[in-house]
Amino acid sequence: MPWHIETDNAECDGYGVVKDATGELVGCHRTRTQAENHLAALYASEPNLEEDRAAGDPPAIVTDIDGTLLLGDSVNQALIQTLDESDAEIIVLTARDPDQRTQTETRLNEIGLDYDELYMVGGESDDVTAKVAVMRRLLERFDVIAAYENREDIRAAYTDLGVDARAPRSNRAIAEEILARFTRVR
């Protein structure tokens, strides 16, 4: 059963560890580090998610935004095309702050991404822990067939969950690979 950390729980003066499904407070801590350690211990005691995935879960692809869909000032059109051509649910999972939801939704619409869900975990002290917590919840509902993420540490954490985690590739990177193969053939 997934859990998360709250800083505004009425029953806790500090950092509360709360069950996602019920909203039940399972622990209250003075520091975020203590709460994260409690969260890690709870997840460590969970059964292997890959073994527990139910057959028939709808397929989903998870993608990050910054450094993945957006590469500096350019848009990763190759990845957007890959996502648009997929029949899977497209889920955006970003470390952007939830206060930026309106701007983020506007930007995703501007780049033409047709997505189904948006999760924003910014403001958490540890992006890896926050993104892994969301990924665990997603694995309960979906067969996550791939996750695109520019950060190697987050990709490694996804891989540990049994998710095919991929580094984003731009049109330029793909073109360079093709050109390199062509040059070797000559």
Image (spheres, rainbow, N blue to C red):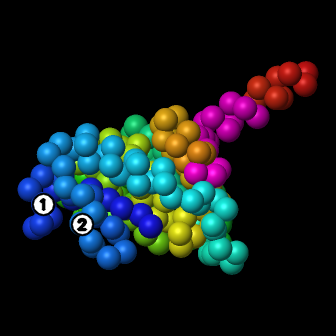
Pointer 1 local density, CA inside 10 Å: few below 14, some 14–19, many at least 20 = some
67 over 58 or under it: above or below: above
Q: Is residue 123 left or right of residue 134?
A: left
Mark 1 to mark 2: distance in Å?
8 Å
Q: Which contiguous range is marked in magenta?
A: 161-178
Q: Is residue 10 left or right of residue 151?
A: left
Kind of residue indicated by mark 1: Cys
Is residue 61 in view? no
Kind of residue indicated by mark 2: Leu
Tags 1 and 2 touching, CB below 8 Å: yes
User: Where does residue 180 sit, x and y in percent of width and height?
Assistant: 77, 26
Tell me the tag on residue 12.
1
Tell me the tag on residue 25.
2
User: Which quarter of the rendering shows the N terminus?
Assistant: bottom left
Does 176 lie within the magenta span?
yes
Pointer 2 local density, CA inside 10 Å: few below 14, some 14–19, many at least 20 = some
- Which residue is farthest right? 186
Tell me the tag on residue 81.
none
67 over 182 or under it: above or below: below
What is the quadrant of residue 184 in the picture?
Answer: top right
